[in-house]
Amino acid sequence: MPLDRSPYAEVADRPEAAVALPGQAYVDRDVFAAEQVRVFRAGWAPVARVSDVARPGDYLSVDLGGAPLVVTNDGGTLHVLSRVCRHRGMPVAEGRGSAKALTCPYHLWRYDLDGRLAAAPGMERSTVFDRADCALPQMRSEVWGGWIFVNLEGQASPLAPQLGGLAERLGEIRPERMVTADVLTFPSPWNWKVMLENFLESYHHIGPHRDSLQKSNPGLSTYEGVASDLFTVLENPPADDSHGAFVVAAIFPLTLMFFTQGETPLGVWYELADIETDHFTLKIHLLAPPEFAAVPEFVALYRDQVTAIHLEDVPACQGVQQGIASPLYRPGPLSHLEQPLWRFHRHLEQAMGQVASAAGA
Ligand code: FES
Ligand SMILES: [Fe+2]
């Protein structure tokens, strides 16, 4: 995509001057193709919770930036591997499970959980086959906050040192201690950025959530807390003493998290899976300390609450996706309550621009 067509070229350099992104950012397949490379593959993206692959032998398939991956627990060491067979490209794993090795279902090439090719039947006459050369590529990964993050291009700065302010803010919440109590799946026919933008402002509490969140955490009292080029925190103070504060945070481009505060902090991770230009699958992970995640009545209640809030957001996301596709749409100014959106847009502008110049564009 030539840079002069970038929908991110006009992002304001200060929040008071911020406007929404042009509709092209949400509907153009060339923009999405560039995002796959410059944003998803160049940045750090979450692929699983550590607790999803807790036991040796556990594996979990995920797709990111167009690349099929598999996360493995190899005797306690976590790996993120390409799951594309080094023979003729068949995925060597689907879904999740537990295994001693990953065996490609096509011609039964067998890989150890660290990606090394252990066996390949019928290859002894090939003069170009070298078992050591046929490992599944291993991706650069890092564990932070209980998530496994991957950087597909391998060039990003280490993640944890960039997240000091966020780690400090989440200190007592201790997300790394939380496990997945349940996962709710919603097909989501809107661009991934519509979801992030909805998640990253509580201005809309006064609209879709007027009978729920607006009563406990009024939208007009929310504000951006600690933030950087890589993350933002949205503070949601309570209406009064009978309610609790909650915190929304994002690590750009794809990690969306929500935490309640107080004695028993609970969390939510919005995983955006199978992302395409105009849709993705939303997997809402309910996170809780293990002692709460093990209580079915508690999990059922939590599931109902989170589902109800998300269903209030669905018409807004659907409506926005329709509206921004209109030839008559012009981006409007953003409120100070939407400062995290401006920060997200700046991240996109930098990510899309940097790679273009690195490539000599
Ligand atoms: S494609 Fe995997 S063994 Fe042939
Ligand atoms: Fe919402």
Image: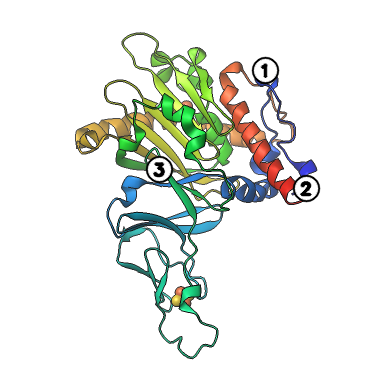
Choose between 330 and 319: the one closer to the eye. Answer: 330
* Image coordinates for residue 104, horizontal then vertical, percent: 41, 72
Colouring of the image = rainbow
Total number of numbered labels?
3
Is the residue 92 above or below the residue 234 in the image?
A: below
For marks 1 and 3 on the same chain, the one whose residue lies earlier in the sequence: 1
Left or right of 62? Residue 292 is left
Furthest residue to the top? Answer: 240
For marks 3 and 2 on the same chain, the one whose residue lies earlier in the sequence: 2
| Mark 1 surroundings within 10 Å by alpha-carbon count, few (fewer than 14), some (14 through 19), many (20 or more) | few
Q: How far is the residue under mark 1 from the one under mark 2?
A: 28 Å
Q: Is residue 38 visible?
A: yes
Secondary-structure class at tag 3: strand
Amino acid marked by disc 3:
Trp
Disc on res. 2? 2
- Residue at left 30%, top 36%? 177
- Residue at left 30%, top 20%? 262
For marks 1 and 2 on the same chain, the one whose residue lies earlier in the sequence: 2
Q: Is mark 1 within 8 Å of ligand 2?
A: no
Residue 6, image quadrant: top right
Q: How far is the residue under mark 1 from the one under mark 3?
A: 34 Å
Q: How far is the residue under mark 3 from the one under mark 2?
A: 35 Å
- Residue at left 66%, top 28%? 20
Q: Nearer the viewer, mark 1 or mark 3?
A: 3
* Image coordinates for residue 188, horizontal then vertical, percent: 50, 42
Residue 93, image quadrant: bottom left
For the residues labelled 3 and 2, say whether their Cβ atoms are less than 8 Å apart: no
Disc on res. 147? 3
| Residue that label 1 marks | 16
- Residue at left 45%, top 27%? 248
* Image coordinates for residue 46, horizontal then vertical, percent: 46, 45
Left or right of 208? Residue 261 is left
